Image: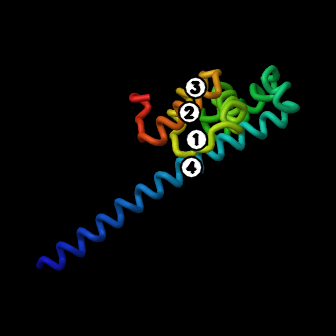
Amino acid sequence: MNDYYKEIEHLIKRNEVNKQVRKIQDNSEDLNTKWEIGRLLVEAQGGERRAKYGDKIIREWSKDFSKLYGSGYNTTNLKQYRQFFLSLGKSATVWHLLTWSHIREILPIKNENERNYYINLCASNNLSVRAL
């Protein structure tokens, strides 16, 4: 009887670990997609200098993407994806360890050193968004 218990426990533990791995992979894929969307928006708008001012493409494309894929691709979100690329694309190397909720909280910080401080703080201490 005890062997069955241990075998079941082993299966449960393995399943729980696999759930966590999939969760991390999904988060990483989600962030990479948002970063790439931001990069492509910047390129479509003519580079970093022009991307800061040109929102026409975002407004037009967000209508199409929202119809096709839902509100995750509305104007506000596409602007955040662009800001994600512009703000964090070149600086922090550990942003992929955070969630999109963390990144949205950090994006408004203009000072790169301060932004990197909070990114590293979250990543090294596994801070929740609330704790951030």
Label 4: which secondary element: helix
Q: Could you say which disc has been placed on residue 103 in the image?
A: 2
The structure residue drawn at horizontal position 46% and vertical position 42%, both measured from the top left corner, is 124
Label 3: which secondary element: helix
Q: Could you say which disc has been placed on residue 114 in the image?
A: 3
In the image, what residue type sits under mark 4? Ser
What residue is disc 1 on?
95
In the image, what residue type sits under mark 2? Ile
Of badges 4 and 1, nearer the viewer stands 1
**Residue contact between numbered discs 3 and 2, judged by CB atoms under 8 Å:** no
What residue is disc 4 on?
28
| Displayed quadrant of residue 19 | bottom left
**Residue contact between numbered discs 2 and 1, judged by CB atoms under 8 Å:** yes
At which x and y percent is residue 61?
A: 76, 32
* Of the image marks 3 and 1, the number of the one nearer the N terminus: 1
* Of the image marks 2 and 4, the number of the one nearer the N terminus: 4
* Figure label count: 4
* Of the image marks 3 and 4, the number of the one nearer the N terminus: 4
Q: Is residue 53 above or below residue 5?
A: above
Distance from the alpha carbon under mark 3 to that under mark 4:
23 Å
